[in-house]
Amino acid sequence: MKQTKTRYTIIRYDDNRILARFIKNITPFSFRNWFARSTPSRIDKLCKRVQRVLGIHSLQFTVTIRLFADRKSFVAGYNRLYGKTSKKVPRSLYDFLYKVIYVNVDDVDEEMLAHEFTHPIFREYFKQSPPRIITEILATYVESHLHDRIKRY
Ligand SMILES: [Zn+2]
């Protein structure tokens, strides 16, 4: 297993192509990004953006992100962790116990990772974690308002 550290994350993956694919898929398409080299700093940029959308500043924390190459290995990894269930396996998830974000690089995009980042950010920010339903509502908000102009209150 390979590992890359960024400011906010420790990324774990099987080979470099998986990491490259991950970074490419969370980089929004634009003329500038098309020519810019994909680097792991893109991941921190997105994490910072999520914090700004939530009005949270200068939070220092680290979250592990485990990358899977495709749906098949994601589901296999999920079943290893939680045991086989009849429940629908999600597209990505944050494990509150192990503090790990699990993603399938085939499927991931910027919004999906922004959603998952919301969970460890809340966990770090609040002394007592808000009810799960509240974090899901706000994670979904972040996901769909990632590029909106940030409101000031
Ligand atoms: Zn969620």
Image (tube, rainbow, N blue to C red):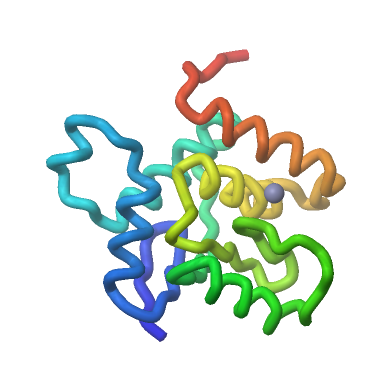
Q: Image quarter for residue 110? A: top left
What is the total number of numbered labels drawn onto the structure image?
0
| Image location (x, y in percent) of residue 137 | 75, 36
Q: Quadrant of the C terminus?
A: top right
Report the front residue among 111 and 152.
111
* Horizontal arrangement in the rendering, residue 81 relative to residue 107 (left or right): right
| Image location (x, y in percent) of residue 62 | 52, 62
Report the front residue among 69 and 137.
69
Point 46% across, 25% down: residue? 147
Point 55% across, 26% down: residue? 145
Point 37% across, 50% down: residue? 25
Point 28% across, 62% down: residue? 20
Q: Quadrant of the N terminus?
A: bottom left
Q: Image quarter for residue 75? A: bottom right
* Horizontal arrangement in the rendering, residue 94 relative to residue 86 (left or right): left
Report the front residue among 115 and 24.
24
Q: Can you say whether 68 is above or below 90 in the image?
A: below
* Horizontal arrangement in the rendering, residue 146 relative to residue 54 (left or right): left
Q: Can you say whether 83 is above or below 69 in the image?
A: below
Q: Can you say whether 114 is above or below 73 in the image?
A: above
Q: Can you say whether 66 is above or below 137 in the image?
A: below
| Image location (x, y in percent) of residue 41 | 31, 53
| Image location (x, y in percent) of residue 30 | 25, 31
Furthest residue to the left?
A: 35
